[in-house]
Image: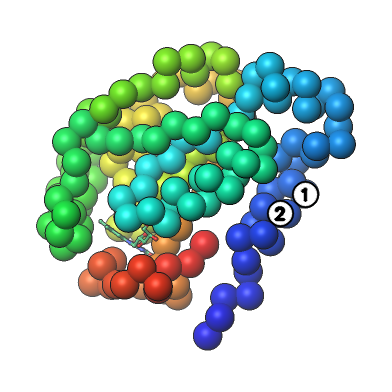
Amino acid sequence: MNNPFTRRDGLKMLVGLGAIASPSAKGQAQNAAARPPLVAYFSRTGNTRVVALQIRRAVSGELFEIEPAAAYPEDCRQTVEQAKRESDAAFEPPLKQLVQNIAGHDTIYLGFPIWGMTAPPVIRTFVARHDLAGKRLVPFSRRLRGRPKPEHACAPRTACAD
Ligand SMILES: Cc1cc2nc3c(=O)[nH]c(=O)nc-3n(C[C@H](O)[C@H](O)[C@H](O)COP(=O)(O)O)c2cc1C
């Protein structure tokens, strides 16, 4: 069954909530140019990256890919097991790099796939390693359709939803 909630609906919703600056608001636009929103995302198989690129275009933001210093295994099930171990231990996997100018962004769009019904461990690292005090944080995520059980985590990409 098709999901009637499209990506366009999601972006409209964010604009409605004021999370995305209206392009007609001159002051906001000037501010966005001077202090562009940051669109930071983690994506293992590319789904979250697609949304991150759309948001980056919609808000004229700067893109930052959150990457673990040591990549997760190619094998999805091994990744599931590793992620579970890391989450259980509240481990913060080191990142390949940090945002150099985090102070230059007032709004941060933070994107990630849902892993084990929550954010992946690298997102914990990202939040812990940057000073986000006073910033507007706009999370977005991709997940599987419906109410997946842990054993469905590696279902085909076509099964993903916003
Ligand atoms: C380790 C792991 C755990 C996952 N756990 C869940 C989950 O709990 N719920 C869910 O809906 N999808 C889960 N998924 C599926 C991903 O959220 C989904 O495939 C997502 O679209 C992947 O985004 P990406 O291509 O940006 O990595 C899991 C995937 C992996 C690899």
Side (left or right) of 66 relative to 50: left
Q: Position of residue 83 (x, y in %)?
A: 21, 50
Where residue 159 sits, quadrant-wise, is bottom left
Q: CA distance from mark 2 to mark 1?
A: 5 Å
Where residue 156 sits, quadrant-wise, is bottom left
Side (left or right) of 116 relative to 81: right
Q: Position of residue 15 (x, y in %)?
A: 74, 46
Where residue 60 sits, quadrant-wise, is top right
Q: Is residue 132 above or below residue 77?
A: above
Q: Is residue 149 above or below residue 115?
A: below
Q: Amino acid at mark 1?
A: Gly
Give the camera-side residue of 89 and 125. 125
Ligand 1 has an atom within 8 Å of the beta carbon of the residue at disc 2: no
Q: Which residue is mark 1?
A: 16
Q: Residue at x 42, y 15 (%)?
A: 100
Q: Is residue 162 above or below residue 133?
A: below
Secondary structure, mark 2, is: helix
**Residue 88 in view of the camera:** no
Q: Which residue is mark 2?
A: 13
Give the camera-side residue of 53 and 38. 53
Q: Are marks 2 and 1 in contact (CB under 8 Å)?
A: yes
